[in-house]
Image (cartoon, rainbow, N blue to C red):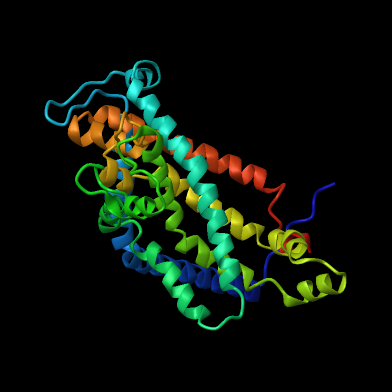
Amino acid sequence: MTEPAAAIPGPERVQDALLSAAKTKARNKDFKRNDVVGYMFISPWLIGFFAFSMIPIAISLYLAFTDYHLLRGGEWIGLANFDRMFNSDIRYGRSVAATFKYVLVAVPLRLIFALAVAMLLNTKRRGVYWFRAAYYIPSVIGGSVAVAVMWRQLFGGDGRVNEGVVNTLLGFVGIERLNWFGNPDTAIWTLILLAVWQFGSPMLIFLAGLRQVPAEYYEAASIDGATAWQKFLRVTLPLITPIIFFNFIMQLISGFRVFTQAFVITAGNPLDSTLFYALYLYRRAFNDFQMGYAAAMAWVLLLLIAFFTFISFRTSRYWVYYETKES
């Protein structure tokens, strides 16, 4: 048997198909024209992104595998920079130890202090708005060189010429003058104290989170006879865990990149007790001109931050409560 011949479309269907193809072509043309206009508008950002971010990152990655000296140039040495870093550079190990000590102590203390102050400022008291602005001031000026110099003067500079306000106050209660920045046991703690003092930024974020906690939850807890501490543990703390997590990530990254305080106040002394990672990297790059080694250090720091951030995100599912996800 012969198969039936395919139906031949009528003139109306051919006309509709041609009209549809013409509309599709017109839409594609408009879409391409809009694409060009869009790329033109974002071109300044694209140029800046590639010129000041992607290209330097690529160059830094290449330099990490060279012994590039800023004045003499360099050559490809493979993984030698990383081998030197982990096996023969004693000061590198000290810088890692000092940085981890700073992060492990300063980050939790700053978050706890910021949350405590935010809870105090979340109460309805007279003049609370003034206190909110006043407590935020250290964060506005906190990262500046001027604050670092002021902090150095408060604790007595080198401990010989200028005793500092802190030593003077301690003298009133019979405590002998301490050489805060000249003693390896106390130098890093003064920098940690400075980090805790700069609590304004996380405090404001905590304050915004506390104001989002529904008052009905506290009223229900009061009816059940919960104490203030129980309300904090059972109501406040679970509901602000996303805020805690956000602040923790931000402070963790900031802690690993600490530089200005140690550079201005202690210069990494005494005995490398405040030789933080970023400060040691800076010295290798701009004091010793070992750009290849400094680039390798920078990539290790990036991987360290990425690793701890990844771990934080993976573990957040066990302690961070998202109300929308729960619903």
- Camera-nearest residue between 119 and 177: 177
Please state the horizontal and vertical placement of residue 264, each as a whole percent of the image. 26, 46
Name the residue at 75% across, 56% down: 5
Residue at 32% over, 53% down: 168
Residue 34 x/y as whole percent: 40, 69
Q: Is residue 227 above or below residue 93?
A: below
Q: Looking at the image, is 260 positioned above or below residue 288?
A: below
Q: Residue at x 79, y 64 (%)?
A: 327
Closer to us: 135 or 62? 135
**Which of the pair 131/205 is nearer the observer?**
131
Q: Residue furthest bottom?
A: 126
Q: Is residue 290 left or right of residue 170?
A: left
Residue 273 visible? The answer is yes
| Rendered location of residue 196, percent (x, y) | 46, 53
The image quarter in which residue 117 lies: bottom right
Q: Can residue 208 be spotted in the picture? A: no
Residue beneath the point at 51% across and 67% down:
204
The single residue placed furthest to the right in the displayed view is 224
User: Residue 236: x and y, percent?
Assistant: 70, 64
Residue 225: image quadrant is bottom right
Number of marks in the image? 0
